[in-house]
Amino acid sequence: MHIHILGICGTFMGGVAALAREAGHRVTGCDAGVYPPMSDQLRALGIDLIEGYSVDQLDLQPDLFVIGNVVSRGNPLMEAILDAGLPYTSGPQWLSENVLQGRHVLAVAGTHGKTTTTSMLTWILEHAGMQPGFLVGGVPENFGVSARLGRIDAASRPASGHPFVIEADEYDTAFFDKRSKFVHYRPRTAILNNLEFDHADIFADLAAIETQFHHLVRTVPKSGRLVVNAREESLNRVLERGCWSDVARFGVRGDAPGFRARGEPHAFDVLKAGVLVGRVEWGLLGEHNQMNALAAIAAAEHVGVTPQQACEALGQFANVKRRL
């Protein structure tokens, strides 16, 4: 299949492009700003890039247009696609139908720390030999790429039930789909890292964002796990609206059920319900990274990685390159 991606140079859509190319599709794309490092990464994958949104791109005759949320009504190429009645979809919808279907999806949501925590969780699963697929809004230095399919089956398709870790953004999907991106992913394991007011361009207030997070909670099955920051009142309000899955909390106090850290952010013990289960010594600083680590450890446990194994992996975590 030939896929043409509008808004291809964003971190998310660039990751979608890389996954589509790895899956064997012909991929082309366009954006208003085609420049390094994303342009270099995409061209290295054999993806042809076009600067701007000229109508003559219809002459490429792709089988499907994948539309990034940077594209709005009035965009000349999008208007031409609509007038011609050509097939189009959003990036999250394409990802859901072509990559995530049948996988054990681990989604990392939150106002802060998504990229870092997604990278930590992916590295923990890789260190455990699981060869996870992933899509991260940056470049994890342990991998050198922002996205990959992970283990595939004999038919060169993503292996059923195999883990796929995704950075799960609450921003809207596309101009024609105003739901948050993460409602498309249908995770079995979901990290709710934190929740504060953000994206004032599309959300009226914190309550509106809490509603979207509860939409995500509604998609997690009974056999799934929600990994929740115990210190966030906003997340408590989200769960009070209804919760149907196991909840593993992190950042708890004392011997309460859940995960907590004891020690300095660069060298700390990990305790579960007050019992020592591992120790992390690494080069990262800050309590926020300590909390990110606890979330990743709790999520990895849901797919069979012990906290001790996860702590050992984090000792070799090399952080992530991202935009500033």
Image: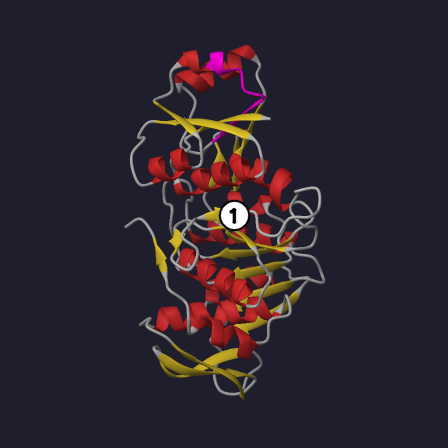
Q: Nearer the viewer, residue 52 or 201?
A: 52
Residue at 40% across, 16% down: 76
**Observer able to see residue 132:** yes
In the rendering, at what x and y percent does residue 66 appear? 52, 29
Locate the N terminus by quadrant: top right
- Asked which secondary structure carries label 1, the reply is strand
Q: Nearer the viewer, residue 28 or 108?
A: 28
Against 102, is 269 above or below?
below
Q: Which residue is tagged 1?
A: 148
In the rendering, at what x and y percent does residue 139 appear? 39, 51
In the rendering, at what x and y percent does residue 180 appear? 51, 44
Residue at 50% across, 29% down: 27
Against 195, is 34 above or below?
above
**Observer able to see residue 111:** no
Residue at 67% across, 62% down: 224
**219 on left or right of 269:** right
Taking the magenta stretch, the answer to whether it contains residue 154 is no
* Range of magenta residues: 58-67
Residue at 59% across, 47% down: 185
Q: Amino acid at mark 1?
A: Arg
Taking the magenta stretch, the answer to whether it contains residue 62 is yes
- Tell me, what colour scheme is on the image? secondary structure
Crowding near pointer 1: few (<14 within 10 Å), some, many (20+)? many
The part of the image, by quadrant, that contains residue 165 is: bottom right
